Image (tube, helix red, strand yellow):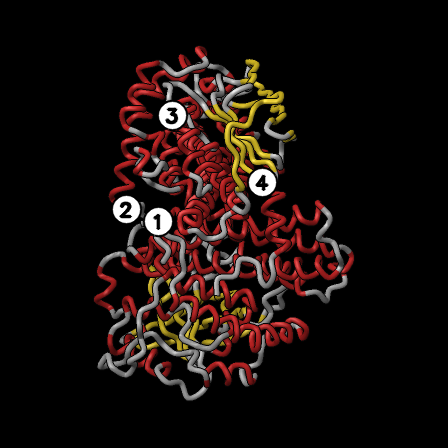
């Protein structure tokens, strides 16, 4: 029955992530953005606690945890620095396609491609990217990925999952946000397919998990924007009182918190559905869409509350505004999400949101 | 462990609520809306409601064993049930007989004699019986500390004077729990609640309001003119009020009430969503992206509102503070449900303007969800007090 307590084991994992985020990521926020990379010492600390392997099976050296654990950890990391959170995870959303396969050889290939420290994977999906398969080779072009390098591409093309390890061409980009993760465009031109398998219905589940991955990073950025701007509004005084005590701002702060809380519950419910093996595609798509909708309010409002200071790079609010926007453009963004959620809703029989 | 499942018992209760809602509540609600009048006291719906075991008190009886089926229901399950009932007709849920809103107060702080006297008749009601709680006044809504109805000690009793408004079921209630003040300048500490029984001299001037929606139940104004009640009618008895517990009595009711209104709003929004989906399907509109996008937004936000509402209930089940969460649920769900019905109307196009579609009724009905138990603005004040210490 309904329960929002994570339980002791998961709470400990989340606490570990929060500690790392606070001690290692947050103090180097601007440094990582300028360097377009995380510091080696940060990567070492991250690898030491094994957060990348959170969802890998135990026999592959992972923690064997699920989507709920992932979204909780991602929120903690992204609340400190979403770009760094992406940079530190070699697998990212690409993992989910591979995990949905029963073919463990492809998982081994995937892990081998990403074994080097700093290696990164990319996920592409033919529902948003045109992917052309030509025998044993594949063509595709992606305008932006939050990555400084790509060592493996997992592509969903029709009912097939393709793993590409060679012939991956990337071109660096300035990046609108998430610069600590790097930014590049990607081109596969007759790239050899290293491995392939039928994924079928697993593609929808993989897409759901990918969306929850991005959605939970978004939650972290939005939480930080809410917390930081609220704290500022309590310190900054105007017309004889903290600006938070002017009702125009008090209500804005309230609406931001409401938007965050609602979006988070959608993410958690969808993640729970993933872990329970329940239908999750529509729920995850809706959760991502709602996080993006919340970001349209919270990102710019965080800057607004800080006024002129919000616009300046001395404070992290302008970064939160840019990064929340960029995260909502990843993985097909809002339009692809509401398309999937809407299709599931409209194709459904009986009453929507039925529990009985 | 994080879990969003619904157990078998809850499912069963939801199925019962669905069947009753579809067969009895929806028709009764449409009838009242059409006639623009509350369902009369002798409406067969009420008799049927009582016949199937409705309208009873949660109080177990003087020796605690009159009822053997008083298995405690979690707040989460209750909220889901109330969501489902409101799906069929929220106005009818309010019209339902029973000890209603004041029951919680009586259970919490009523004396044993008061429970027996006022809740006793609801143990196995011989006919549909109602009770109601009267807080709101023409000049005091959510600012409960501002109520002006006065209570003056008179020998071994009390004299009440004042006016109450928008009180659900007041003209048909066996008794009304009236919130009054001993000293309007002394704020909350001077407030008391009194049982005023039907027929008490001085209780009168009942005026059933005409409403935009939720017409199945009566919202009634009444006056108290030198209305005398005995000392035994002071809720909790004299000793209870040595401290400032008076105001807290009212606030506790409000705290329990907000997630309920939120759940009601979600149910009403779901009804609008299903009607909109059905309309779009029948008229082959589902291929249109603009139509699908509206429906998707409705479903997504209702799903979110439901979760926010259940969170408030879940905290209550664990006896954890839920002031912020209850207000967030109320503010968010009422807004979402209003938006949902408005989008539903848009989807109907000119059919929505005819005035005979269920979504049109829901559009009128649901507005009250952002008003009762504290408007959306009052909720934001409550939230902001907690989040940023907004001064009173």
Q: Which mark is residue B2?
A: 1
Q: On the same chain: label 1 and label 2?
A: no
Q: Answer whether labels 4 and 2 touch (C-beta < 8 Å).
A: no
The nearer-to-camera label among 2 and 3 is 2
Viewer-proximal residue among B90 and B386: B90
Find the distance from the CA under tag 4 to the CA under tag 3. 26 Å
**Badge 4 sits on which subunit?**
A
Where residue A52 appears, as percent x and y from the top left, is 36, 29
Quickly name the residue at label 2.
A7
What kind of element bears circle 1? loop
- The answer to which image quadrant residue A91 occupies is top left
- Gap in Å between the C-alphas at discs 1 and 3? 24 Å
The answer to the question of whether label 1 and label 2 lie on touching residues, with beta carbons closer than 8 A, is yes
Q: Quadrant of the N terminus of chain A?
A: bottom left
Answer with left or right where residue B369 lies relative to residue A217. Answer: right
Residue A232 seen from this side: no
Q: Position of residue B254 (x, y in %)?
A: 40, 58
Instruction: Determine contact: label 4, label 3, CB under 8 Å.
Output: no
Of mark 4 and mark 2, the one earlier in the sequence is 2
Evaluate if marks 2 and 3 touch, with contact meaning CB atoms under 8 Å apart: no
Residue shown at the point (52%, 34%) measured from the top left: A196
Residues at circles 1 and 3 in contact by the CB criterion of under 8 Å: no
Q: Residues within 10 Å of mark 3 (few under 14, many from 20)?
A: many
Residue A337 - label: 4
Residue where numbered disc 3 is placed = A80
Whole-number angstrom distance, CA of label 1 to CA of label 4: 24 Å
């Amino acid at each position: 029955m309904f329960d929002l307590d994570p339980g002791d084991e998961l709470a400990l994992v989340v606490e570990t992530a929060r500690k790392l985020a606070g001690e290692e990521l947050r103090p180097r926020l601007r440094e990582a953005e300028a360097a377009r990379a995380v510091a080696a010492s940060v990567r070492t600390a991250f690898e030491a606690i094994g957060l990348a392997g959170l969802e890998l099976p135990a026999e592959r050296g992972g923690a064997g945890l699920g989507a709920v654990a992932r979204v909780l950890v991602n929120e903690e990391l992204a609340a400190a620095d979403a770009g760094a959170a992406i940079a530190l995870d070699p697998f990212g959303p690409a993992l989910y396609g591979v995990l949905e396969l029963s073919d463990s050889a492809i998982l081994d290939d995937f892990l081998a491609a990403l074994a080097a420290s700093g290696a990164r994977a990319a996920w592409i999906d033919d529902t948003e990217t045109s992917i052309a398969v030509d025998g044993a080779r594949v063509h595709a072009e992606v305008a932006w990925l939050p990555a400084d390098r790509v060592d493996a591409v997992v592509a969903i093309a029709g009912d097939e999952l393709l793993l590409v390890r060679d012939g991956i061409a990337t071109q660096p980009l300035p990046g609108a946000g998430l610069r600590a993760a790097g930014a590049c465009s990607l081109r596969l031109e007759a790239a050899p397919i290293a491995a392939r398998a039928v994924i079928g219905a697993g593609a929808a589940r993989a897409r759901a998990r990918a969306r929850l991955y991005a959605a939970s990073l978004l939650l972290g950025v939005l939480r930080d924007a809410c917390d930081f701007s609220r704290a500022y509004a309590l310190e900054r005084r105007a017309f004889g009182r903290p600006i938070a005590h002017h009702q125009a701002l008090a209500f804005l702060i309230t609406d931001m918190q409401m938007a965050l809380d609602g979006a988070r519950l959608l993410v958690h419910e969808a993640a729970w559905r993933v872990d329970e093996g329940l239908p999750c595609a529509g729920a995850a798509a809706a959760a991502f869409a709602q996080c993006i909708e919340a970001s349209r309010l919270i990102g710019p409002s965080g800057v607004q509350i800080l006024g002129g200071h919000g616009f300046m790079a001395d404070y992290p609010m302008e970064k939160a505004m840019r990064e929340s926007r960029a995260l909502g453009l990843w993985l097909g963004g809002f339009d692809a999400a509401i398309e999937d959620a809407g299709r599931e809703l409209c194709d459904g029989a009986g009453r929507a949101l039925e529990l009985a | 462990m994080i879990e969003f499942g619904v157990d078998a018992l809850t499912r069963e209760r939801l199925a019962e609520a669905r069947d009753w809602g579809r067969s009895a509540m929806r028709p009764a609600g449409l009838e009242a809306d059409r006639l623009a009048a509350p369902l009369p006291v002798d409406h067969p719906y009420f008799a049927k409601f009582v016949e199937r075991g409705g309208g009873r008190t949660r109080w177990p009886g003087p020796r605690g064993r009159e009822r053997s089926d008083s298995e405690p229901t979690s707040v989460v399950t209750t909220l889901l049930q109330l969501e489902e009932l409101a799906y069929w007709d929220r106005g009818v849920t309010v019209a339902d007989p029973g000890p209603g809103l004041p029951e919680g107060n009586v259970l919490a702080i009523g004396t044993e004699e008061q429970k027996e006297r006022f809740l006793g008749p609801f143990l196995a009601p011989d006919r549909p019986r109602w009770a109601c709680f009267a807080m709101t006044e023409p000049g005091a809504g959510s600012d409960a500390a501002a109520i002006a109805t006065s209570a003056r000690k008179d020998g071994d009793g009390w004299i009440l004077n004042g006016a109450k408004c928008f009180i659900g079921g007041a003209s048909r209630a066996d008794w009304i729990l009236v919130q009054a003040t001993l000293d309007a300048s002394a704020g909350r500490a001077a407030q008391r609640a009194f049982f005023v029984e039907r027929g008490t001299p001085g209780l009168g001037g009942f005026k059933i309001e005409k409403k935009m929606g939720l017409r199945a139940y009566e919202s009634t104004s009444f006056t108290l003119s030198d209305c005398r009640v005995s000392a035994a009618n002071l809720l909790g008895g004299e000793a209870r009020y040595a401290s400032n517990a008076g105001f807290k009595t009212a606030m506790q009711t409000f705290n329990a009430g907000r997630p309920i209104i939120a759940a009601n709003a979600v149910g009403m929004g779901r009804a609008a969503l299903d009607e909109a989906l059905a309309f779009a399907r029948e008229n082959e509109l589902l291929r249109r992206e603009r139509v699908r996008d509206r429906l998707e937004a409705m479903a997504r936000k209702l799903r979110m509102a439901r979760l926010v509402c259940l969170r408030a209930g879940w905290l209550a089940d664990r006896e954890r503070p839920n002031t912020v969460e209850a207000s967030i649920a109320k503010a968010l769900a009422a807004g979402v449900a209003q938006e949902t019905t408005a989008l539903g109307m848009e989807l109907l196009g000119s059919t929505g303007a005819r005035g005979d579609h269920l979504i049109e009724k829901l559009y009128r009905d649901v507005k009250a969800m952002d008003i009762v138990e504290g408007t959306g603005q009052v909720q934001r004040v409550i939230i902001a007090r907690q989040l940023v210490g907004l001064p009173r």
